Image: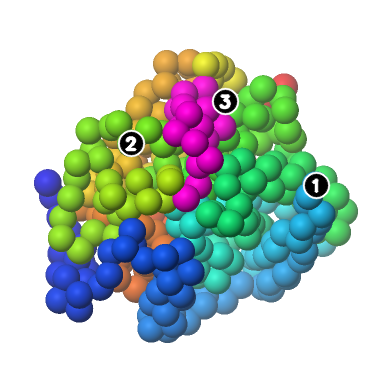
């Protein structure tokens, strides 16, 4: 396996510092550990025009925190494309702050509004709670059309890992006309098969933050039962029909237990005649996108994400 120098350095440091493996921590400990790392990284947030935090009430009458990021080119007298972003973290950790740097960077590179969704985490809220919140948020997008001059013909979904799972399910719902039209999906090392049966689940290096054991830990917290693992709304790879899917970009890491399911998802999309662009970062490990201080390749990937969104936005909307 190829391994980039920064990846090797990161993993060796985790081993040297005796960093605890994710699956050996309780969910609250894991969340605090991620926020601690964020504080230690002490990244300077990229400058954008503005940020607006909003709460919406879900169907369950629970607040969902949203964060709108506005690019420097935002204007009130024109329609603005929007990328709805779902953070990763195995459905157990992550929030608006863990991916704030990432969302700001995507906002800058795409020159689009980015809407980050702070969905509820497991095990407190198990499948399909977070997914239902994601569905509610995207259903609510037209209510922001006038306030933020949103272009409802240019709605994109994006997410890394578990967030890629939620984005993928929303895109499938769009293809089935079960939600507002989604023009494109951008998935970063997406988690699309919760059966843990892919060969790449054997990928292991000392210091890796995501392993088979970690995925098993996440899934046990997320799902109510093992039977849910083959429900396509938990594992979008298993949906019967992928016709008329939005255009798709998949960005993958070579040192990632989720590698093979991303490839399988790409192949299924292509089998049903959909347009897919796949980009592999062979020497990178899972999570590199949201750990920009340690993985310089994240900057390259974010530029590619911005380019992908802009390319899709220029294409005529399919009727």
Q: Are marks 1 and 3 in contact (CB under 8 Å)?
A: no
Q: Residue 229, position in %: x, y?
A: 46, 32
Task: Name the residue located 52 percent from the left edge and 22 percent from the top edge.
Answer: 239
> How far apart in space, not on screen, are marks 1 and 3 (Cα)?
26 Å
Which residue matches tag 1?
59
> How far apart in space, not on screen, are marks 2 and 1 (Cα)?
31 Å
- Mark 3 crowdedness (10 Å alpha carbons): few <14, some 14-19, many ≥20: many
**Quick one: SS at disc 1?**
loop
Query: In the figure, residue 40 lies in which quadrant?
Result: bottom left
Q: Which residues are magenta?
A: 221-239
Q: Residue 307, position in %: x, y?
A: 48, 49
Q: Nearer the viewer, mark 3 or mark 2?
A: 2
Task: Name the residue located 69 percent from the left edge and 48 percent from the top edge.
Answer: 133
- Mark 1 crowdedness (10 Å alpha carbons): few <14, some 14-19, many ≥20: few
Q: Are marks 3 and 2 in contact (CB under 8 Å)?
A: no
User: Which disc, if any, is residue 196?
Assistant: 2
For this view, does 65 lie left or right of residue 313?
A: right
> How far apart in space, not on screen, are marks 3 and 2 (Cα)?
25 Å
**Quick one: SS at disc 3?**
loop
In this view, the residue farthest toward the left is 1
Name the image colouring: rainbow
Tally of numbered discs: 3
Q: Residue 43, position in %: x, y?
A: 43, 80
**Quick one: SS at disc 2?**
loop
**Is 318 or 94 nearer to us in this picture?**
94
Q: Earlier in the sequence, mark 2 or mark 1?
A: 1
Q: Earlier in the sequence, mark 3 or mark 2?
A: 2
Which residue matches tag 3?
245
């Amino acid at each position: 396996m190829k391994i980039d120098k920064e990846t090797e350095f990161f993993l060796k440091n985790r081993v040297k510092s005796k960093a605890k493996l994710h699956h050996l921590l309780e969910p609250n400990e894991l969340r605090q550990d991620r926020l601690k790392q964020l504080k230690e990284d002490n990244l300077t947030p990229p400058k954008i025009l503005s940020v607006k935090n909003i709460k919406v009430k879900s169907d369950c009458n629970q607040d969902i925190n949203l964060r709108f990021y506005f690019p420097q080119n935002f204007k009130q007298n024109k329609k603005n494309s929007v990328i709805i972003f779902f953070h990763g973290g195995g459905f157990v950790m992550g929030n608006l702050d863990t991916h704030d740097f990432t969302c700001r960077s995507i906002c800058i590179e795409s020159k689009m509004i980015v809407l980050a969704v702070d969905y509820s985490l497991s095990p407190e809220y198990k499948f399909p709670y977070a997914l239902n919140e994601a569905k509610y948020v995207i259903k609510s997008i037209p209510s922001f059309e006038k306030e933020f001059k949103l272009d409802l013909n240019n709605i994109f979904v994006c997410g890394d890992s578990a967030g890629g799972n939620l984005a993928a399910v929303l895109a499938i719902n769009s293809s089935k006309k079960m939600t507002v039209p989604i023009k494109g999906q951008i998935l970063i090392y997406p988690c699309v098969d919760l059966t843990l049966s892919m060969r790449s689940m054997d990928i292991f290096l000392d210091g890796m933050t995501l392993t088979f054991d970690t995925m098993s830990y996440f899934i046990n917290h997320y799902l109510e039962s093992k039977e849910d693992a083959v429900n396509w709304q938990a594992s979008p790879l298993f949906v019967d029909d992928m016709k008329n899917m939005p255009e798709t970009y998949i960005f993958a890491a070579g040192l990632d237990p989720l590698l093979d399911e991303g490839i399988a998802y790409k192949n299924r999309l292509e089998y049903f005649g959909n347009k897919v662009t796949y980009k592999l970062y062979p020497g990178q490990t899972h999570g590199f996108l949201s750990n920009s201080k340690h993985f310089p390749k994240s900057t390259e990937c974010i530029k590619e994400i911005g380019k992908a969104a802009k390319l899709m936005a220029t294409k005529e909307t399919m009727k």
